[in-house]
Amino acid sequence: MQHTLILCQVLVVIFIALHDWLPLGKLNNLTGVRAVDTRGRLAITTVMSALPFAAVLAASIPFASTGFPGWLLSWLWITYLVCALGILRAWWIPYFTAPDPTRAERYRVRFAGTHGFLPLRNGIRPDTLHVAFHALVVAALVLLGLVTFASRQAGQ
C-alpha cells in the first residue's frame, strides 16, 4: 500500500508541476491559462503549489519499504487534507452550492474548450483533467487511511 501511496504522490506532483505548462489537447487550454495569468505569476504559483507535495513525497520515499513513521503520516494527512479542502473551496462548493461569479468567469476563460462531462452549474463546469486530479487526491487520502490503519495495527 505504501508503494501505491507513493505512486499517487508522484502523480500529484507531476500534475501540479506540469498541467499548466504542457499542451494536453482537449484536457487543458494553455492559451486560456496565459490569458488569466502571466508566465511569472504562473511559475510562482506552480512552484508554491508543488513544493509541499514534492517535499512530503521526498520524505516518504525512504520509508516506502519500512513503514511510514508517525510524524510522516501526520505530515501527509495535513498536506492532503488541506489540498482536499482547497479543491472543495475552488471547485465543488461553487459548483454545487455557492455561486462565485468572479471564479466562474476566470474558469470560463481558463478552461474554455477543455473536455468535460459534467453539466455547467453556477457558471462552472469541472473539466475532465481536474476531476481526474480530484479523484487522485481522494485515492491518496483513502490509501493514507489504509496505511495509517495498518501502521497502528502493526504498532499494537
Image (spheres, helix red, strand yellow):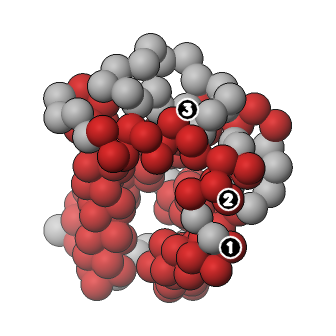
Instruction: Compare residues 113 and 66 and report the one nearer the observer.
Output: 113
Residue at (40% x, 76% y) in the render: 68
- In the image, residue 44 lies at what x, y percent? 56, 81
- Is 87 left, or right, of 53 in this rendering? left
Query: Mark 3 or mark 2: which is in front?
Result: 2
Q: Secondary structure at mark 2?
A: helix
Q: Earlier in the sequence, mark 1 or mark 2?
A: 2
**In which quadrant will I find the C terminus?**
bottom left
Residue to which mark 1 is pinned: 39
Q: Which residue appears at 26% of the width and 54% of the height?
A: 85
Q: CA distance from mark 1 to mark 2?
A: 7 Å
Mark 2, other Cα within 10 Å: few <14 / some 14–19 / many ≥20? some
Q: Are marks 1 and 2 in contact (CB under 8 Å)?
A: yes
Q: CA distance from mark 1 to mark 3?
A: 22 Å
* Image quadrant where residue 92 sits: top left
- Amino acid bearing label 3: Asp
Front position in the image: 13 or 62: 13
- The residue under the point 58% across, 23% down is 116
As helix, strand or loop, the secondary structure at mark 1 comes to helix
Q: Position of residue 103 (x, y in %)?
A: 36, 46
Q: Which residue is mark 3?
A: 127
Q: Which residue is mark 2?
A: 34
Residue 10 seen in the current view:
no
Secondary structure state at the residue bearing disc 3:
loop
